[in-house]
Image (cartoon, grey):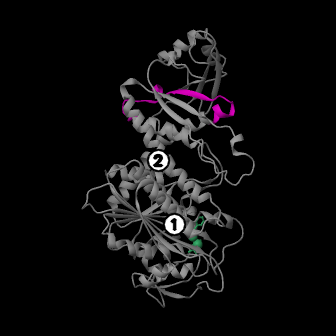
Amino acid sequence: MMKTKVSIKTGQALNQKTACLVLPVYAGKPRFATFAALDEKLSGQLGKFYRQREFSGRREEMLLVHAGPGLACERLLLVGMGARKPLTAAGGRNLASQVADYLTQHHIHGGLIDSSELMTPRRDGALVVQALAEGLLLAGYRFDQYLTKDANEKPFLPAVGLLIPSTLGKKNAEKAVATAEALVAGICRARDLVNQPGNQKSPAYLAETAQQIAADQGLSCSILGRDQLEKEGFGALLAVAGGSERQPCLITLEYRGGGQEEAPIVLVGKGVVFDAGGISLKPAEKMDEMKMDMAGGAVVLGTIQAVAALKLPVNLLAVVPAVENLPSGSAYRPGDIVTSLAGKTIEVLNTDAEGRLILADALTWVQRYNPRVVIDVATLTGACIIALGHHAAAVLGNHEGLIRALLKAGEGCGERLWQLPLWEEYRAQIKGDFADIKNTGGRPAGAITAAAFLQHFAEKYTWAHLDIAGTAWAEKSSPGAPKGGTGFGVRLLFEYLRAQC
Ligand code: BES
Ligand code: MN
Ligand code: ZN
């Protein structure tokens, strides 16, 4: 991916030499000084646009004006913001992505966004800058490695400036841009992994990617292959892997940015590189999308990459159980009873409820790190999509404080979570008849009973589970997020971790 260069500028908007000065404006004729001065230089043109209602500042409205003599900029772009209200992180990203798209579509090769109208006394200006920079950078994301026409033909925005009020401080703002760059690189890493097709994406491919991240960021990486998993007793994970010729593995990346003695935070991500359902085969329609069933794994890899790139002072592990779930003569069957790494026996009622099986063993395995907190991320249930649709991920867990911290991080960065209850009563649905537990609890509350299953294997530590089934994949493109993998969760976990430091 080509990267837009984002730079920070200070000073008067009027004096800025740029191909396009971008001015976000709220609904109604603007009253701030820059606007009045620009209007004067343009012989009252701007006022006229408002009077004749050719432009009024409604959301997503854009107006491009050529500047002419007397102004340092070549063009002026007014961008409508709608009714005045505090800018959210998602709002800032969206605005910046829209501006980037507009400029590229109009073959304008650079611009300067005046952020002063977006700053409010109660909002941290650095967060506004970070959101704008993220939006600019994400607008350049494409997954085009399999398009045989020259990808360079597609328009691309080489550079954009952000004009900030001097009170924010250039250093501060530049730090926010660097944060955005590392975070976006992590998000794009996750998107690329999710978008990669199943024929290219074996468990070994995920492992190689993890090794690449480790080499780039100076992390330690370990991979357990099939023989080691057998020796250790990963019975549930190996049962799922049985149907595929591709070897399963358990990937562990370790970053140590915190104190020597400090217990780590562990992120566990579901890494089913393709989920056909196994013998309980899925219907053909949309089965192609099940290449995204490793999105949780992609998210934890993207997160640790961003955290390491920015050297956050925290000890962090990313663990990815990686398998493929296919039907075949060697596949596990409905009715099979398997013994998990924890020793609990599991009755497999449906081979398509495979995520919880591989996560069960991974959650057991990470006990060995005496973690401070464990968070698992998984495209776990279709039921989660029924419950929340595509606008929020579900959060459940065994510790209200952790859940609250995650909800707060999500609200702050715009990757929203919604808590579902994990009451004792739900456990009855997955109590086994012929083994300790069974891997499905029937249709009622499917997202919750899946979490209740995981809870059996997360008893020894503070734990939360994020079901990202509805948010990992976008069916339609939107500004800064083309159809395909979204990387949802990288930003959320990054902001959660940053708040812990
Ligand atoms: N990977 C799927 C869940 C999923 C569905 C993710 C759609 C994203 C989009 C998971 O492995 C699965 O198949 N779950 C089953 C569980 C059921 C058999 C208890 C489901 O949700 O249907
Ligand atoms: Mn499945
Ligand atoms: Zn799955």
Q: Does the magenta stretch include residue 491?
A: no
Using the rendered view, name the quadrant where residue 407 is placed: bottom left
- Tell me the kind of residue under disc 2: Leu
Identity of the residue drawn at 54% across and 83% down:
348
Using the rendered view, name the quadrant where residue 330 is placed: bottom right
Residue 49 vertical placement versus 451 (above, below): above
Of 468 and 197, the residue lying toward us: 197
Q: Residue 183 carries which label?
A: 2
Q: Give the range drawn in magenta.
A: 101-125
Q: Residue 27 carries which label?
A: none
- For label 2, the crowd category at 10 Å Cα-Cα, with few meaning under 14, some 14 to 19 and many 20 or more, is many
Q: Does the magenta stretch include residue 106?
A: yes
- Tell me the kind of residue under disc 1: Ala
Judged from the image, the secondary structure of the residue bearing numbered disc 1 is helix
Disc 1 within 8 angstroms of ligand 3 (CB) = no
Q: Is residue 289 left or right of residue 425?
A: right
Q: Name the residue under label 1.
A: 207
Where does residue 94 sit, x and y in percent of width and height? 55, 39
Residue 121 vertical placement versus 324 (above, below): above
User: Mark 2 and 1 residues: CB-CB less than 8 Å, in contact?
Assistant: no
Of 399 and 331, the residue lying toward us: 331
Residue 169 visible somewhere in the drawing: yes
